[in-house]
Amino acid sequence: MTFRNQWGDQLREALISILQSKVFVGILSVFVFSMMVQVLTGLLLSLHYVPSSMSIMTEKGIPANVKLANIAKLDAEGDTITIPGEIILREAKSNENKTSISYLSVLSIESSIPLNTIRMIHRINTHVLLIAMLAIMLMLIVHVKETQWMKGMWFVLFCIGTCLTLSGWTGYILPWDQYSSTSFSIVTGFFNQSMIAFGVFQGASHNGVMVIDFLSRIFSFHALILPIITVFFLIVIKNILCLNIEISRNFIGFGFLTLITVIGLMYSSEHVLYLPSDSQIPTITTIEPVWFFQPLHGIVSALPADGGLSVIIGAIIAFAYLPFIKSHTIRLILLALIAISTLYFALAY
């Protein structure tokens, strides 16, 4: 049996009932259009975002704090100094967070209605991508009983899901506010313990935390490396299954585009940026998206560090191994156990 047949004709024949179902086609259409939206909005935002964790300095060379003017201010002669929405720099006190360049660039994006609309679409669409990818993987697990032709394809799907998860996770670090600091601490801890030991990344540190433009490295992963890897695996899946999504007459896809645009416009005036995180001493609060990472918080909170890490790794391995289980009944039982455990730890937190 040739490699092409293993990954081609017989695989498509085994999955034909799912590939032609209206539910799968609908979810796949949403996923494809969601990927297009994410790439386009990401490119537009990258034109205005500056990936740097360096602190902003005043003209006197003192670390500055940033705020938006909420009223118009005039000098003694009646000349306008600031108008609502403009950014004001002032010297930061010792107990205040020192605003980074990245935070200022995101603050500028939020102060612009068109740019903030794009950012909200990009932010909300991240959840759509993760849900659509998870739905596709679950459909294959639940409905395909014969796993002979699924093993290799499942590996590719698992890699795509991992890349999308990492892309979403690294994206939440970039604004450099207090909600991104948890992810930053985890990522820098990983790199400090592994990559730096091999001399891959070099940089200054403060209290053991890398601080010099680490955001630029994360931005490279988020905007370049992970998307390229994801697109590569998507092309592999497309060639294996000969998937063909009609763009011009895809009512589901264009309906999704309309919906996500309307949602972005509805939230265009909202400011989701939290207080700035000190670029040298991150303030750990929480990690987003909450619905996706909530079980991890529960595991870490309920179990000792080593036990929590073992459970997380075990769950990932079990999920990746699902298609290799010959018995469809055992596969569904294991999937149910993973789902119940995930829900338990999510609620326990």
Image (cartoon, rainbow, N blue to C red):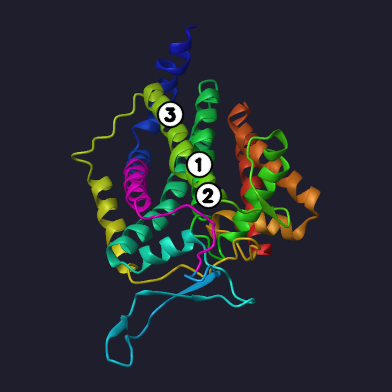
Which tag is nearer the camera, tag 2 or tag 3? 2
Label 2: how many Cα within 10 Å (few below 14, some 14–19, many 20+): many
Query: Does 255 appear above or below 106?
Result: above
Measured from the top left, where is residue 211 in percent x and y?
62, 54
Residue depicted at x 31% and y 57%: 260
Q: Is residue 164 visible?
A: no
Q: Residue furthest left?
A: 248
Q: Is residue 66 within the magenta segment?
A: no
Q: Which residue is disc 1 drawn over? A: 221
Residue 232 badge: 3
Label 1: how many Cα within 10 Å (few below 14, some 14–19, many 20+): some
Which tag is nearer the camera, tag 1 or tag 3? 1
Label 3: how many Cα within 10 Å (few below 14, some 14–19, many 20+): some
Q: Please report whichever mark, 1 or 3, sits nearer to the chain's N-terminal start.
A: 1
Q: Is residue 81 visible?
A: yes
Specify whether 32 is left or right of 335.
Answer: left
Q: CA distance from mark 1 to mark 3?
A: 15 Å
Type of amino acid under label 1? Phe
Whether label 2 touches label 1, CB < 8 Å: yes
Type of amino acid under label 3? Phe
Residue 170 badge: 2
Q: Is residue 50 within the magenta segment?
A: yes
Measured from the top left, where is residue 54 in percent x and y?
54, 58
Q: Please report whichever mark, 2 or 3, sits nearer to the chain's N-terminal start.
A: 2
The C terminus: image quadrant: bottom right
